[in-house]
């Protein structure tokens, strides 16, 4: 997670945790929560940092058969289409939950839905093949993206003060992860290829936060979540362009594999406002 996000989350939680006990004692009974028991709705804003491992695989070299004419060419494509992406974006959304308090302990369930616009790419434009006769250049791109996020989590908390709830949270996280790749070159064989895949990923999330009651109905919270979704792979191929495909086939060439995958995890720091009813 970026240092700015860690500091922001830490600062928000510190503000909540340093509410002096004497201030709570001076609060009139009308503004203190009778209990954290009940249901609530609310909204949140924050920032997400995505950690993506993007990998491209152009297969193995098969002499006089595969489209890519040398192992150096395959290695070049793999290198330009692979690597780590560190992405960040603002997030926002809505939440709904319910809690039950017993003494100083609070248990509950919460679900939220919001934006999660994480996306990035690796690639090369007009990059010269290490080995190709006659010399030629290629252009390739591998990319990933998401746009929404749903989580469903349990919350387990403790109230050091009647109006302050500190909690740990964890459960499932769901998003739609899309991966795609494209390829073309200006060789006489006019290589072209690409593919895309999209899957709804059910991952997991863990985090912690603090919530401060402003009145019997209203509260504010600061929260950090870590999310892990696994990976999505798209499987395609690269072959001679349509104008010369028949010639390449007649020469015994076969399409070369062209696969890209993205493995996604993320950090979210956010603040929210809840209304309890």
Image: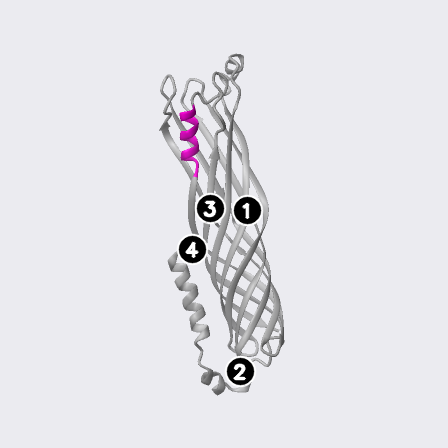
Q: Which mark is residue 1?
A: 4
Q: Which residues are magenta?
A: 71-82
Q: CA distance from mark 3 to mark 1?
A: 10 Å
Q: Secondary structure at mark 2?
A: helix
Q: Nearer the viewer, residue 13 or 190?
A: 13
Disc sitting over residue 52 in the figure: 3
Q: Earlier in the sequence, mark 4 or mark 2?
A: 4
CB under 8 Å between discs 3 and 2: no
Of the residues under marks 3 and 1, which one precedes in the sequence?
3
Quick one: label 4 or label 1, which is nearer the N terminus?
Answer: 4
Decide whether the magenta segment is chiefly helix, strand or loop: helix
Precedes in sequence: disc 3 or disc 2: 2
**Horizontal side, residue 212 vs residue 97: left or right:** left
Q: Residues within 10 Å of mark 3 (few under 14, many from 20)?
A: many
Q: Which residue is tagged 2?
A: 31
Viewer-proximal residue among 224 and 117 = 224
Is residue 73 located in the magenta-colored stretch of the structure? yes
Tell me the distance, in whole angstroms, between the alpha carbons under discs 3 and 2: 45 Å
> In the picture, which quadrant includes the N terminus?
bottom left
Q: Earlier in the sequence, mark 4 or mark 3?
A: 4
Marks 4 and 1, how far apart at CA: 18 Å
Q: Is residue 185 left or right of residue 31?
A: left
Residue 146, compared with residue 56, is above or below; it is below
């Amino acid at each position: 997670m970026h240092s700015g996000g860690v500091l922001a989350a830490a600062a928000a939680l510190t503000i909540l945790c340093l509410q002096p006990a004497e201030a709570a004692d001076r609060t009139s009974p009308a503004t203190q929560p009778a209990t954290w028991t009940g249901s609530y709705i609310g909204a949140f804003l924050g920032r997400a940092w995505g950690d993506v491992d993007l990998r491209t695989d152009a297969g193995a070299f098969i002499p006089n058969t595969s489209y890519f004419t040398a192992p150096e060419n395959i290695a070049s494509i793999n290198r330009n289409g692979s690597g780590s992406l560190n992405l960040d974006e603002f997030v926002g959304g809505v939440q709904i939950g319910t809690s039950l308090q017993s003494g100083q302990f609070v248990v509950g369930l919460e679900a939220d839905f919001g934006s999660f616009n994480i996306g990035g790419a690796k690639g090369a434009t007009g990059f010269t093949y290490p080995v190709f006769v006659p010399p030629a250049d290629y252009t390739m791109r591998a990319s990933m993206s998401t746009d929404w996020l749903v989580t469903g989590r349990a919350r387990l908390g403790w109230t050091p003060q009647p109006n302050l709830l500190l909690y740990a949270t964890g459960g499932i996280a769901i998003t739609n992860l899309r991966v795609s790749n494209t390829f073309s070159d200006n060789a006489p064989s006019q290589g072209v290829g690409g593919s895309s895949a999209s899957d709804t990923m059910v991952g997991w999330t863990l985090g912690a936060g603090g919530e401060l009651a402003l009145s019997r109905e209203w509260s504010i919270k600061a929260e950090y979540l870590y999310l892990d979704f696994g990976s999505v792979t798209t499987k395609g191929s690269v072959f001679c362009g349509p104008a010369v495909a028949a010639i390449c086939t007649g020469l015994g060439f076969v399409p070369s594999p062209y696969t890209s995958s993205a493995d996604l995890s993320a950090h979210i720091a956010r603040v929210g406002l809840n209304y309890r009813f």
